[in-house]
Image: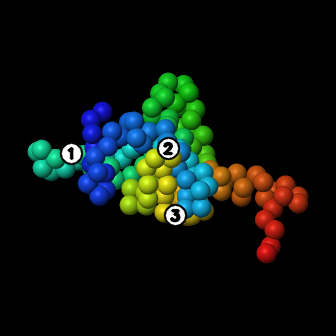
Amino acid sequence: MSVEQFGNGRQLWAVLELLGRQLVDREGRLVGKVDDVEFEISDDPGGLPEVTGLLAGLGALASHIGGEAGRALAAAERRLAARRERHPSRVDIGLVREIGSSIEVDADREDLDTNRAERWVRDVIVDKIPGAGHVAE
């Protein structure tokens, strides 16, 4: 893949510098891994595509794998996602603070769409176990 434009005009190799990188929130907590990249194509004939979002989770990964495994991952994502959220988890590129060995985003883990599978497991499974629910502060 060629070089793509990044937010502030920085150019980068999306496959090398974004895909597979860990996403961490402003507190350094893991919030997912970049499985796909969303682009906006410029109307300018000489313009480069611009990265608009980072996609994470089963929904983004399933389309890359394909076959039976991809269909199984897509089915798992559909079950984990609420009806209105049946799309890959997305982090807006405007939230990215730094791209290095990981990608730091300026948000809290709880506020990101990439955390929905963890929320589902907590709300549907863990909170049903006696004594395992949230502790009131």
Reading the image, the residue beneath label 3 is: 107
Q: Which residue is pictured at 78% across the width and 65% down the height?
A: 134
* Cα gap from disc 3 to disc 1, whole angstroms: 28 Å
Is 8 on the left-hand or right-hand side of 134? left
* Cα gap from disc 3 to disc 2, whole angstroms: 18 Å
The answer to whether residue 75 is above or below residue 105 is above
Q: Which residue is pictured at 48% across the width and 50% down the height?
A: 103
Q: Quadrant of residue 37?
A: top left
Q: Quadrant of the C terminus?
A: bottom right
Pick whichever, 36 or 24, lies toward us: 24
Task: Give coordinates of residue 126: x percent, y percent.
Answer: 78, 54
- Would you call the spot at circle 1 few (<14 residues within 10 Å), some (14-19), or many (20 or more)? some
Is 85 on the left-hand or right-hand side of 1? right
Q: Quadrant of residue 36?
A: top left
Is 7 on the left-hand or right-hand side of 77? left
Q: Marks 3 and 1: CB-CB under 8 Å?
A: no
* Residue 101 - label: 2
Secondary structure category for the residue under label 1: loop
- Disc 2 residue type (three-letter): Ser
* Cα gap from disc 1 to disc 2, whole angstroms: 24 Å
- Disc 3 residue type (three-letter): Ala
